[in-house]
Amino acid sequence: METVLLSDSIRQLEAAAQLIKDGEVVGIPTETVYGLGADASNEAAVRKIFAAKGRPADNPLIVHLADFSDAVSYTKNIPALAYKLAEKFCPGPFTMILPKNERIPYVTSGGLETVGIRIPSHPVMHRIIELSGCPIAAPSANISGYPSPTSAQHVMDDMMGKIAAVVDGGQSEFGVESTVAAIENENTVRILRPGCVTAEQLREICENVIIDKAILNDIGSDEKVPSPGMKYKHYSPKADIVLVESSFDDFVRYVGANDGEKVYSLIFDGDAERFPYKFLAYGDNDLAQAHNVFQKLRELDEIGAEKVYVRAPSSEGVGLAVYNRLIRAAGFEVIRI
Ligand code: TXA
Ligand code: MG
């Protein structure tokens, strides 16, 4: 199949929306990462998403809507807390797990009785949802297990020949996927995946905010997890990633003792002038690091890195999302000095 690269002109967005109505899969920009979008209510179209990504059938897809008021059409028994959260965080990088109704097929929900609902703020994505008139199921547009795409080029790199089109909506603003939250009762939410809506922000609306233990810990494959995505290897480039938690000086010594031809480090921008080995830098604060992290993991593959030592980010605020992606990219291999 030929994969067409579309611009964000209204004509081309109409073409993208028509492809989605016709049951095709289209790479679409959002403010978090690029997604692989298809009509969430069309089982055959949703199966094409799973096939293009090589994604396990039990890993559910998030459904994207133009406005939270549309959620009543695809879910049931929406708790009052969901409306409060939506008022504050929708549209934006935030996904709520709600009980699904019969309009969301089990293919989309990975066999679950719930569905993740997200209202993206990216104007191009918003337009595509409106023009298609469909609820749009969209996982991140990477090959399963690989770092998520934050540009149309990344999507072309992974999906060329496998999907109908990719819409270029520029570089993704946040760079990591949405915060996924399950509502446990009227004053408790559980964060299943951290993102740019932080635990601290959620606490302003909701009394109890639980950070699920799978966010920072390796969960045994036979343990029951609240989100199927937690079981799978994630975000890994070809290079072997090792997360190093240490001071800058200890980091330099550690890399020095383990340096080699295809060894690289991923460090903070402020370290760059004093760092004597091969490196890429991924930012100096949590938002910059979120914006850059997947892009840099992909670049490390392009330059032929085989082993990468990563200076661990802070795990506060948006840092928790960056830390979560990196510890998973590292397969939970962490060196603490
Ligand atoms: O920012 C994002 O959320 C991007 C953009 C494209 O919107 N989408 C995205 O989708 O990251 P995906 O499929 O790559 O990740 C969705 C995660 C998976 O880990 C999945 O297991 C979890 O959310 N998830 C989806 N529906 C769920 C449900 N009903 N219950 C529990 N976890 C769910
Ligand atoms: Mg993903």
Image (cartoon, grey):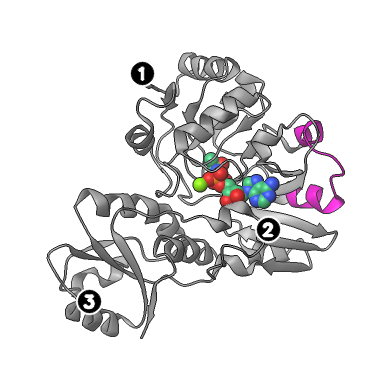
Of badges 1 and 3, nearer the viewer stands 1
Q: Nearer the viewer, residue 95 or 240?
A: 240
Label 3 to label 2, Cα distance in Å?
37 Å
310 in relation to 291, above or below: below
Disc 1: which residue: 2
**Residue 226 shows which numbered tag?**
2
Residue range in magenta is 69-87
Position of residue 119 measured from the top left corner of the image (x, y, whole percent)? 65, 39
Residue at the disc numbered 3: 255
Looking at the image, the residue that sits furthest to the front is 222
Residue 127 appears in the figure: no
- Rendering quarter of residue 74: top right
Q: Is residue 214 magenta?
A: no
- Numbered label attached to residue 53: none
Query: What amino acid type should be assigned to the residue bearing mark 1?
Result: Glu
Kindly identify the amino acid type of the residue bearing the numbered disc 3. Val
Secondary structure mostly seen in magenta is helix
Q: Compute the Cα span from label 1 to label 2.
A: 38 Å
- Return the x and y of residue 28 as percentages of the image width and height: 49, 31
Q: Residue at x 26, y 51 (%)?
A: 301
Q: Quadrant of the C terminus?
A: bottom left
- Identify the mark nearer the N-term, 3 or 2: 2
Q: Position of residue 20 (x, y in %)?
A: 56, 20
The reply to whether the C-beta atoms of the residues labelled 1 and 3 are less than 8 Å apart is no
